[in-house]
Amino acid sequence: MEIRKKGRRPSYTNSAPAEKAKEVYNMFLLKLSEKGINYQTGQFQQYMRIISESDGPVNLIIET
């Protein structure tokens, strides 16, 4: 089956089940800690309200 990109929003149709996703998320947090990177988290799979401010000419587009 061909999957075509439409618009700018990512598709989550092929995402991992919640338990596997949580495992990957926790591994990612562990790697951040190992590198000494400061971060904050919320609760996995919960609604989170964030405030984001962009200041600069850089846009990062991450495709997987």
Image (cartoon, helix red, strand yellow):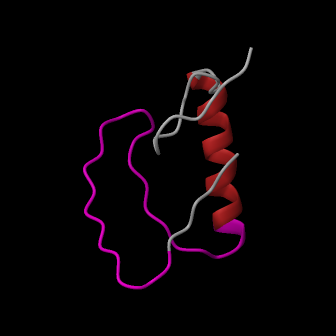
**Residue nearest the observer in this picture, 55 or 43:** 55
Whether residue 53 sits left or right of residue 36 in the image: it is left
Q: Position of residue 26 (x, y in %)?
A: 62, 45
Residue 19 found in image quarter: top right
**Residue nearest the observer in this picture, 24 or 63:** 63
Residue 17 found in image quarter: top right
Task: Please report the bounds of the magenta region as a residue range.
Answer: 33-58
Q: Position of residue 57 (x, y in %)?
A: 45, 83
- Quarter of the image that includes the N terminus: top right
- Quarter of the image that includes the C terminus: top right
Q: Magenta region's main secondary structure?
A: loop
Task: Identify the residue at horizontal 45%, vertical 38% (top origin).
Answer: 44
Magenta region includes residue 28 = no
Above-or-below relation of 35 to 17: below
Whether residue 3 sits left or right of residue 52 in the image: it is right
Q: Position of residue 3 (x, y in %)?
A: 67, 24
Task: Identify the residue at horizontal 64%, vertical 66% (top origin).
Answer: 33
Magenta region includes residue 34 = yes
Task: Identify the residue at horizontal 72%, vertical 20% (top origin).
Answer: 2
Q: Position of residue 55 (x, y in %)?
A: 35, 83
Above-or-below relation of 50 to 10: below
Above-or-below relation of 32 to 6: below
**Residue nearest the observer in this picture, 34 or 58:** 58
Whether residue 51 sits left or right of residue 26 in the image: it is left
Task: Identify the residue at horizontal 42%, vertical 32% (top origin).
Answer: 45
Above-or-below relation of 25 to 38: above
